[in-house]
Every structure is written in structure tokens, then in C-alpha cells.
Amino acid sequence: MKYTSTALFSLLLASACLYSCSPNPYASTNREHKKQLKAYSKQLRTVPAIDPETSTLTFGEHWVGTTNFSLRRPNFVVIHHTAQNSTDHTLKTFTKPQTQVSAHYVIGRDGKVYHMLNDNLRAWHGGNSRWGNNTDLNSSSIGIELDNNGAEPFEEAQISSLLEVLAMLKETHGIPAENFIGHSDIAPVRKVDPNATFPWKRLAEHGYGLWYDEGVVEQYLQPAAPITVLDSTGTEPVLILQPLDSISTIPPHFNPKEALRIIGYDTRDMPAAIRAFKLHFIQDEVSMELTEKDKIILYNLYQKYL
Ligand SMILES: [Zn+2]
């Protein structure tokens, strides 16, 4: 089919308009978002923040505000899968007040990114959660939801966008590598997201999360053979030498519960903590029990968190 230049121009104009001129279906919830921002900024502008008239505290003679401050900074990133069938479904969920759930970012299967909340504000994505002694992850983290039904692999376009978002967040907020974690890590009893196909190893290779030294596991799976020293006749063994690298890398006093706790897991429900650990670091076999191989991985990994 051939187009005249005028027809082609009109077609281009029409397609550009389709994106920028179509009404935003979220116009009314965007207005509500701005209204809430206004209320919070009013709260921030209220000085002194504690009313001396109603407080029982004894204050100094004058209110004195410091000149040296900034916004609080997020220090964790928590990754989720939505367990829903489309990005639209999730956007609707996060704009309905009655659901009481939200995230800073939603990333579609097609890689499209929706930045729903300023990074410096508190989204409601972690729920009842714990990581180390931090019991309010929502206050210190950025929540990222990946559109995924919970049982399927993640699309390449989606992971590629996620890596770009993570690079931006790490750069902007200076988030340490070990603080890129999953929802199941911080809520092991209640949550199993992101699912076992999530590429945690790939993320760690880019500096988002930690990973174990795979060499120690290979060593465990293929231990070097012992060397037998024979007597002078060359027939009777007198000594069997165990090569250093075939000796177990786990000391006898190693305590898996303490190791999981040091990494950050809430170990009050140990089987759930093990399942969360395996969902993140083992992935091809997710159960509530640690095998010898899992213990070697855990021992190697927890030393990186010390
Ligand atoms: Zn989640």
C-alpha cells in the first residue's frame, strides 16, 4: 500500500495523538493522589511538629528549627510478583482505597514501568514483615511489583526494565547490594513471591543482592579422590590422605538457624525461613528442609553477611 506524504503525516499525527491525547483513565485517582500529597506536605510544614499547648513535655523558651536536613532515604528494595493476570488489574488494585495495598513501581510483562509513588514516600507492600531487627520494611524500602501470575517465568523485557530501575535506585539512594530482597524473604510464613523462576543470581551478578560462591558447591558434588599411601611392598595401604578440598567445608559448630538469622530471616518459624531461603538461593528444589548441599550454600553465604 502506498501513502501520499500528507496521508502519511496525518497517520503519524493520529498515532501520536492516540498516546498523548487519549484521556487518562486514572485522572480521578490521580487527583486523589495529589490531594493526599497536599495533606502530607501540610503536615510537614507544621512547626513545631509537637504542639506545646497540648504536650506534657517541658520545651525550651523558643522553637528552634535546624537548618540541616533532607528527606528520609529508602535503604531496601523489596521485589514482588503481583499474582494477578495483567498490569491493568494491578494498577486498578493499587488505585482502590479499600485494598490498602500499593507499590512504588509496577513493571509489566512488556517491560513498561509505572512509577506510582515517589520513592521518598511510604508504599504499602510489605505488610507484616521482618528482616533482621527491622520490623517496618514499608518505612525503609521501595516496593517493586512484577506483573506475573505467580507460577510463570518472568519475561525478558520485564527483567531488563527491572535491572534499569534497580540501577537507578542504587545510584540515587545508595542502597547496599545485600538489601535487594524479595517479599518471601521478609515474610516467610505468609509469602512466596517472587516465584522460584525469579533470576536472583542474575541480579546478584549486577550488584543487586548477594550470591554464594558456586565453586564450593561443585567441590561438594565432585570431591577429589583420597590418595592411598602403600607400604614398602607396594600392596598394603598404610595411610589414606584426604585432599584438603574434599574435607567438609562446614565446621561442626555451624548452626543453620543462626546463619539464617544473620542473613536477615525471621527464624521464629524455622521451616518457613528455610523455604524462603531455598526459594531465593536454591530454587530448583524448594522445601522446608535443608540438605547437606543447602547447608554448604548457607554456610558460604552467611559469611558474606557477617
Ligand atoms: Zn508481595
Image (cartoon, rainbow, N blue to C red):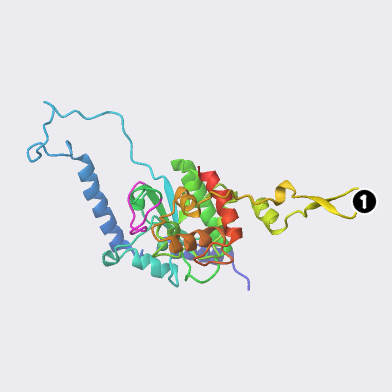
Left or right side of 56 for 40:
right
Residue projecting furthest to the left: 53
Question: Within the image, what quadrant is residue 156 found in?
Answer: bottom right
Q: Nearer the viewer, residue 136 or 152?
A: 136
Q: Position of residue 8 (x, y in %)?
A: 56, 65
Left or right side of 217 for 39:
left
Q: Position of residue 251 (x, y in %)?
A: 58, 48
The stretch of residues the image draws in magenta is 120-131
Q: Nearer the viewer, residue 93 or 22?
A: 93
Q: Name the residue tied to disc 1.
A: 233
228 over 197 or under it: above or below: above
Q: Position of residue 74 (x, y in %)?
A: 39, 45
Q: Disc 1 residue type?
A: Thr
Left or right side of 223 for 113:
left
Q: Nearer the viewer, residue 145 or 283?
A: 283
Please, what secondary structure does the residue beneath circle 1 have? loop
Quadrant for the N terminus in the image: bottom right
